[in-house]
């Protein structure tokens, strides 16, 4: 777990962060995005929202989503290998869910490899469920993708679970949590 006294900060991803993000991505993903993908996302995709999580001044995790109408789709989440298993993926995922609330989304979706037990466990702990399977989705090995969806994120059970996770985090720049009131305020 994260050690007491560590300084965690969240910030929107900037063009100057792309080098560090790419270095993490190349290390932890079997098929990293093409080299210009983050630049394009940050400069030309108005639906895209990317965040960096800094641990003691170094980018330790990043993640992003697209906000499209009532759906927020998580496009990526990665934690520096050295920092995996310390709760930072949970912090980043909670930050993405918070962003989905900010964007006025109703549901969150994502794709994950069926072999990625850590990621699936993380998403299930927020109440996400496997709703579909895309055959041969991953081009590197032909692996299927599991498509996971949240419930309605304003539903009391989903929101209560989210608030109990996010409310325990101490991260600078996390921003206000959504109100516990139904449906939103
Ligand atoms: C998946 C990933 C984002 C998770 O982030 P993380 O910081 O390693 O995970 P956390 O420490 O926040 O732990 C999340 C949960 O997974 C569990 N977990 C973490 N590492 C684990 C491991 N090696 N084995 C089993 N469970 C593990 C944790 O115990 C925690 O569950 P709990 O709160 O019920 O105990 C990160 O491992 C990663 O970047 N992996 C490579 C890229 C990737 O697969 N991204 C997701 C694509 S869909």
Image (tube, grey):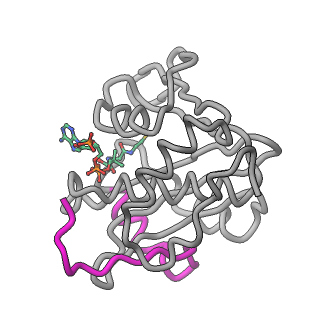
**Residue drawn where x is 37% and y is 61% of the image:** 168
For residue 20: magenta? yes
| Furthest residue in direction front, as rendered | 181
Q: Which residue is pictured at 32% across the width and 68% down the height? A: 60
Provide residue 57's location: percent of width, then percent of height. Answer: 32, 85
- Relative to the observer, which residue lies in front, 175 or 96? 175
Query: Which residue is at a point 55% across and 35% down the rendered structure image?
Result: 157
Determine the image quadrant of residue 72.
top right
Image quarter hosting the C terminus: bottom right
| Range of residues picked out in magenta | 1-26
Q: Is residue 41 above or below residue 170?
A: above
* Foreground of the two, 164 or 23: 164
Quadrant of residue 124 within the rendered picture: top left
What's the residue at 58%, 33% (across, down)?
Answer: 150
Residue 129 is one of the magenta-drawn residues: no
Left/right placement of residue 60 relative to residue 37 reads left
């Amino acid at each position: 777990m994260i050690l007491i006294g560590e300084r965690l900060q969240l910030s929107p991803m900037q063009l100057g962060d792309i080098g560090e993000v790419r270095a993490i991505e190349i290390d932890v993903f079997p098929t990293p995005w093409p080299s210009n993908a983050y630049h394009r996302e940050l400069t030309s995709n108005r639906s895209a929202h990317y965040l960096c999580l800094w641990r003691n001044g170094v980018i330790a995790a990043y993640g992003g989503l697209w906000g499209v109408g009532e759906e927020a789709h998580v496009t990526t989440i990665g934690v520096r290998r050295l920092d995996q298993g310390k709760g930072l993926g949970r912090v980043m995922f909670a930050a993405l869910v918070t962003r989905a609330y900010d964007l006025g989304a109703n549901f969150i979706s994502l794709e994950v490899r069926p072999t990625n037990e850590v990621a699936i466990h993380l998403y299930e702990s927020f109440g996400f469920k496997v709703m579909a399977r895309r055959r041969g989705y991953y081009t590197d090995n032909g692996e299927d993708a599991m498509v996971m969806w949240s419930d309605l994120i304003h539903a009391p059970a989903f929101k209560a679970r989210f608030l109990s996770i996010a409310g325990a985090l101490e991260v600078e720049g996390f921003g206000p949590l959504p109100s516990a009131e139904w449906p939103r305020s």
